[in-house]
Image (cartoon, grey):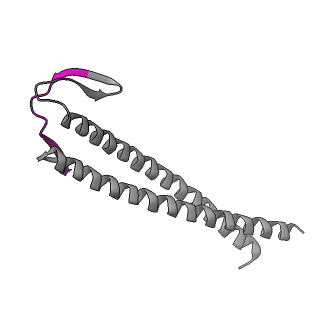
Amino acid sequence: MTKEEEITKNLTLIEYYKQQLESIEMQLQYLQSTLMDYQRAKMTMEQLNAVDDNSEILIPVGGGTFVNGSLKNASNVLIGIGAGIVIEKPIDEAIGKLDERMKRIQENLDKMASFGQKIQSDAEDLSRKTQQMMEETQQ
């Protein structure tokens, strides 16, 4: 393989690394958003656990918007288990489930960030090598 062909191959690979990094960044943002959603749910359940039944509450509907409501029973909550299926669980068990999910998401976040750093490092190394090769061919 000639130097020019190797330079072209390296430039293509660098572009591929760039696309991978963009994809990883999008996945990281999604995981962080999901983690924040679970954290908000956990905080809400913890606060509901401390409120008496038949209390007046504000129910968040998103976008900083709330509706007034009455709490009938805060001892159980409905929690999704996948495929659109929800089950009723005591609030403490539901909080435990959220903790498990948040732990898994955090582990995935850590792995994904580590993978992204490795790709970034590989791309920088290849870029330096390619730059050096380009300078050598110009001489």
Q: Quadrant of residue 41?
A: top left
Q: Image check: 85 left or right of 106?
A: left
Q: Which of these two is toward me, 122 or 53?
A: 53
Q: Image check: 85 left or right of 127?
A: left
Q: Position of residue 97 (x, y in %)?
A: 23, 52
Q: Image check: 100 left or right of 4?
A: left
Q: Position of residue 94 (x, y in %)?
A: 19, 48
Q: Position of residue 88 (x, y in %)?
A: 10, 45
Q: Image check: 2 left or right of 81?
A: right
Residue placed at 12% from the left, 47% from the top?
89
Q: Quadrant of residue 71?
A: top left
> Magenta: predominant secondary structure element?
strand
Q: Which of these two is toward me, 137 or 56?
A: 56
Quadrant location, the N terminus: bottom right
Q: Within the magenta stretch, is there residue 83?
A: yes
Residue 96 shows up from this direction: yes
Q: Which residues are magenta?
A: 67-84
Q: Within the magenta stretch, is there residue 139?
A: no
Q: Residue furthest right?
A: 139
Using the image, determine if residue 59 lies above or below residue 77. Answer: above
Residue 83 shows up from this direction: no
